[in-house]
Amino acid sequence: MYDLKFLSQIQELVNYIVRNRSEDERAAFIRPFQDALKTSEGKKPLDEDVERKRTLFQMVSVEVKSLGDGSEKEIEGFFNLLFSHLYSLHASEGSDTKAYVNAFIELLTHQAPTHKILTYRILSNLFNATERTSPLRSIVYTALIQTAGANGDLDVLQISRANVDKWLSEWNVPQTEKASFVKTISDAYEAESQTEKAYEYEQLYVQTLPSTSSAAQEGAVKLIANALRLPTVFDFDPLFKIDAVVAVKDHELYSLLQIFLSQGLPEFKAWEGSHPDALTKHNLDSTQLERKIRLLTLASLAFQYIGRNLPYLKVVEALQVDAKDVEKWAIDAIRAQLVWGKLSQTTQSLHVARATARTFEKDQWEALERRLLAWKSGLSGVLDVVVNAKRQAGLGQPQNVA
């Protein structure tokens, strides 16, 4: 008895492979498949013979040496059918399955750039066809990232942090392999000079590693250096929630990170003086760090003046800059989205509408409490005015009923 569905699909795959060969070549190519499909006396019927099906699939797979000569739709359909049979005949975590997947990846990642979008789709289809918990998912998507990254096409993949977090929670692989996958993403974004995305996944990489491992501690130091170096990174508080970062608390860069979290220019200068070679060793620029610590200092100062005017003289004192440069620093802080407000040359002040807290500890909670109490008091005053206005208009008096 024949498994007609399997039989027809194997024939479809074979016919696609030989579609542009001569008649004699096609006949010679097809003959071994015809022989394998025959059920001789004493053999199991094909629909019951899994090993024979696996042999037939193996015979097809070894002959897949290119994308073939079909349209994009035909090529994609051909590989989708291959993947379907792979996972119907082999366990997702079997060694044979891994060998097939690696062979398909090797083929797909060495296609001409003219087929790159099609290659991304086929690799994505292979990823989606693979069981959610399978370690093979990591292998497939790593290949997809590396291939797209080599072509400068990472954005085509639309990688999202939510999906990456979900995949990591599902995959049945060691933490080190999960970390390696995340590092692949970070490195790919770094290679494309997408530094903010690279930094986001670098944080996740360090978080994913066992915090006491040498790789985690090495990654934590590099992460701190990158956070300090990147001109768009001003929020250092999340780093102190990463175990591996806290584990390097005795490293010289950890003390510098603490300064950028909650201190100012004098502390930075003192640190620089006591660590004369540290900035060069970690490829950090003193001028850039001075600029960043001044902007952060301005943010902290502005946080104390939310809803009020911040005098320029206070800025001069805190940032140690000339009075003529205050507005430039304020504009830079506004552009960095550390401070929101309005400059006034008339009053020589910055009216602060909003400011970013560098860290939220006791002082920041107390400042928030004071503002909430002031807001509550202001609302009470408004309500008193409304009540008095109603009373004067007679709206607060009971109406006489005739």
Image (cartoon, rainbow, N blue to C red):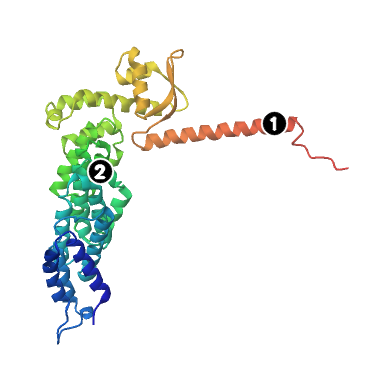
In the image, taking residue 193 as reference, residue 278 lies left or right, namely: left
Residue 286's quadrant in the figure? top left
**Residue at 38% across, 32% down:** 356
Q: Looking at this rendering, what residue extends furthest in the right direction?
A: 402
- How packed is label 1: few (under 14 Cα within 10 Å), some, or many (20 or more)? some
Name the residue beneath numbered marker 2: 154
* Residue 70 versus residue 23 in the image, above or below: above
State the image coordinates of residue 345 (x, y, percent, origin top left): 43, 13
Residue 27's quadrant in the figure? bottom left
**Residue at 25% across, 34% down:** 258
Q: Which mark is residue 388?
A: 1
**Residue at 37% across, 33% down:** 357
Q: Looking at this rendering, what residue extends furthest in the front direction?
A: 23
In the image, what residue type sits under mark 1? Asn
* Residue 313 versus residue 338 in the image, above or below: above
The tag earlier along the polypeptide, 1 or 2, is 2
Real-space Cα separation, disc 1 to disc 2, in angstroms:
64 Å
